[in-house]
Image (cartoon, helix red, strand yellow):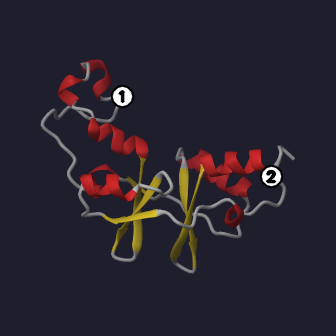
Amino acid sequence: MFGDLKVKEVMVKDFAKCKKSDSVRKLLNKLKGKSNIIVVFDGRKPVGEIDELNLIKVMVNPKKVPHKYIVEMGFGVDFDYFAKTARDIMDPIGVCVGPEDSVTDAIIEMDDGDVKSLPVVEKGKVVGVVSDNDIVKAYLKRGNK
């Protein structure tokens, strides 16, 4: 389906970034006009990512969620817990792709890692983010060729 389409052709270069110590409130502002993924850094090293679902979960008051959904939504059982920083809600980065990797390889990595997006790394530096949404948009733009 994607033939020789490369990650660099579908990735988003203007992505949101944050420090792992940034507040949740600050994270919400970082998403404005950017991709739906925030890459979390510890110094210059990417250590995690936060997507919209991570943020939505902290907007919900766990005391108002029926008990049967608590664990399923990822709140755990501590009703007094309230995420304060990016570190509290980020998903660790398990795998990255390079800009020259094929979109097919990125899809396989996303499926293997059960993630919706991947940082795109070149020479040790994050140069973009590729998400499932970016890939679908590219597919539709190409006219399903």
- Asked which secondary structure carries label 2, the reply is loop
**First of labels 2, 1 by sequence position:** 2
Is residue 85 placed above or below 137 in the rendered structure?
Answer: below
Q: Position of residue 66 (x, y in %)?
A: 26, 19
Q: Residue at x 27, y 38 (%)?
A: 59
Q: Residue at x 17, y 35 (%)?
A: 78
Q: Amino acid at mark 2?
A: Phe
Q: Which mark is residue 88?
A: none
Q: Position of residue 91 (x, y in %)?
A: 39, 52
Q: Residue at x 58, y 62 (%)?
A: 12
Circle 2 residue: 2
Query: Would you say 10 lies left or right of 33 here?
Result: right
Query: Would you say 79 lies left or right of 137 here?
Result: left
- Asked which secondary structure carries label 1, the reply is loop
Instruction: Give residue 18's quadrant in the image.
Output: bottom left
> How far is the residue under mark 2 from the one under mark 1?
34 Å
Q: Residue at x 32, y 23 (%)?
A: 69
The residue most toward the left is 80
For disc 2, the neighbor class at 10 Å (few under 14, some 14 to 19, many from 20) is some
Q: Position of residue 118 (x, y in %)?
A: 55, 57
Query: Would you say 79 lies left or right of 111 here?
Result: left
Circle 1 residue: 72
